[in-house]
Amino acid sequence: MLEDIENLRKEYSASTLDVGDVNEDPLLQFGNWFGEAMAAQLPEPNAMILATSTPDGMPSARTVLLKAADEQGFVFYTNYESRKGKVLERNPRAALVFLWLELQRQVRVEGLIEKVSREESEAYFISRPKGSQIGAWVSPQSQPIAGRDILEAKTIELERQYAGAEYLPLPPNWGGFRVRPTLLEFWQGRPNRLHDRIQYTLLEKGKWKIERLAP
């Protein structure tokens, strides 16, 4: 059905990465790389794969958008009653993957999940386009629906209801999650599949162990 997949190959030679090249703080290192992805005008540089697992080990992955990153971790927003929201409530651990193919780079993150404050969620929510705010109210995310017309009808209703409002209130079941990292890996593509991989592992008292991994 899919022919010649085994012959798809690309040599990576855009850059190199060594332990001596990286910042001692992995979140600052991420900020450096993210800044370079932004400067390169990559499409959706904040798109990341979010992987979760149920308590009994069933994995699931999807693409979400990073909306904040600082010394506390990586923040994204969602409906708390969505599939991922419910899973993260039951098993508050997650992994992230950023892939910037144009720079021949990848960043992996593993960590613990916590909800951001209601105040932080509200501040972000009202900064969104009004149409996106309406969408958050309209969609029972991950739930089966009979058809798109249901969403469209609710959208029209809310557009009329809040026509004179600058923004909508924050839905009670919508907000942010923060991934507090315990491990980060920075991957730089190299020729002959001998890629550079630098891993940070969180130790006690906020210290990070930095080491090179075999490709």
Image (spheres, grey):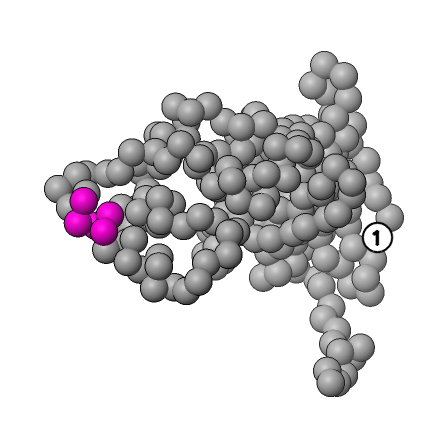
Q: Is residue 112 visible?
A: yes
Q: Is residue 186 visible?
A: no
Q: Which of the 4 quarters of the picture holds residue 91?
A: top right
89 on left or right of 64? right
Which residue shows up at 74% across the image and 37% down it? Answer: 55
Which region is colored magenta?
157-161
Task: Name the residue located 18 percent from the left edge and 44 percent from the top edge.
Answer: 161
Q: Secondary structure at mark 1?
A: loop
Decide whether residue 105 is among the magenta residues. no
Image quadrant for the N terminus? Answer: bottom right
The three-letter code of the residue at mark 1 reads Pro
Residue identified by numbered label 1: 215
- 1 up-or-down from 18: above or below: below
Horizontal side, residue 28 vs residue 167: left or right: right
Task: Where is residue 73? Give x, y as percent.
Answer: 58, 30
Residue at screen point 56% across, 31% down: 178
Counting from the top left corner in percent of width and height, residue 18 is at 75, 43
